[in-house]
Amino acid sequence: DQQVKQNSPSLSVQEGRISILNCDYTNSMFDYFLWYKKYPAEGPTFLISISSIKDKNEDGRFTVFLNKSAKHLSLHIVPSQPGDSAVYFCAAGGSGGYNKLIFGAGTRLAVHP
Amino acid sequence: NAGVTQTPKFQVLKTGQSMTLQCAQDMNHEYMSWYRQDPGMGLRLIHYSVGAGITDQGEVPNGYNVSRSTTEDFPLRLLSAAPSQTSVYFCASRGAVSGNTIYFGEGSWLTVV
């Protein structure tokens, strides 16, 4: 049973518009969430994170929203750029150790001109 | 600024062969871990270590061994390779100075025939 789910395997967005990537989790013990970005043939790179005590965290064009009651988080990219085209992974960790991150299956974002 | 370095980048093994994937980090991170990435499955934790001499199992540890004799190195051993172990393997590390952010290596592509 997947504890972290990214139900959209792919998303296509026009350059300049908003990209919204979604993630759902089932374990209420998760208290830390991260988004990673991955280009082909490279390792995942950290993008942005949020603690469960917050409901929003912003870093430039990237904003992560957390809805604890719905066990849902989303990543907003505004404005989207062609260089944002990549696979985005949602990950969650809990008090058992942040090294034991549980990842979603990923969403492939394509930003086209 | 090497970060997390994995070798080899590509490897083809025959069923039943053994091999070791090497991982080294130069950031003095306490935590190191190995993940595998399979299509539609995201990243799954194989083994992790919270410090030299200490290792523990992740989600999918069967068929793999690890050891942590130094802070810098965390090799992953495949004892008797099976086609089900065909995957992309990522080593990752985290330290107190990096907070909860995990840093990944570039990946090792393993094919077992």
Image: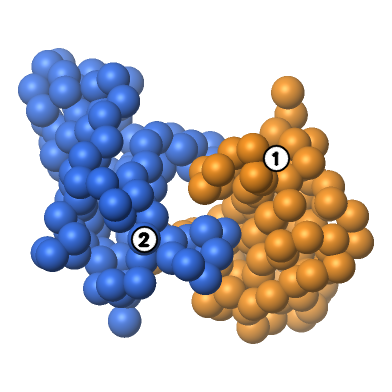
Chain colours: A blue, B orange
Between B38 and A66, which is closer to the camera in this rendering? A66
Q: Position of residue B50 (x, y in %)?
A: 71, 62
Tell me the residue at 73%/23% (across/down). Answer: B1
Tell me the residue at 18%/60% (across/down). Answer: A68
Number of the label disc, if any, that sits on residue A31: 2
Quadrant for the C terminus of chain B in the image: bottom right
Q: Position of residue B77 (x, y in %)?
A: 79, 69
Q: Chain of mark 1?
A: B
Q: Secondary structure at mark 2?
A: strand
Between B52 and B37, which is closer to the camera in this rendering? B52
Q: Chain of mark 2?
A: A
Between B101 and B80, which is closer to the camera in this rendering? B101
Q: Is residue B7 left or right of residue A9?
A: right
Quadrant of res B84: bottom right
Q: Amino acid at mark 1?
A: Val
Q: Nearer the viewer, mark 2 or mark 1?
A: 2
Q: Residues within 10 Å of mark 2 (few under 14, many from 20)?
A: some
Q: Kindly indicate whether the residue at mark 1 contacts the one at mark 2 (C-beta within 8 angstroms).
A: no
Q: Position of residue A44 (x, y in %)?
A: 49, 42
Q: Extreme front residue here?
A: A53
Q: Position of residue B53 (x, y in %)?
A: 86, 68
Q: Amino acid at mark 2?
A: Asp
Q: How many marks?
A: 2
Instruction: For residue A5, say whether it is visible.
Output: yes
Tell me the residue at 36%/66% (across/down). Answer: A30
Q: Is residue B18 above or below residue A23?
A: below
Q: Is residue A30 left or right of residue A107?
A: right
Q: Residues within 10 Å of mark 1 (few under 14, many from 20)?
A: many
Instruction: For residue A106, say whether it is visible.
Output: no
Q: Is residue A85 above or below residue B4?
A: above
Tell me the residue at 37%/42% (across/down). Answer: A49
Residue at numbered disc 1: B4
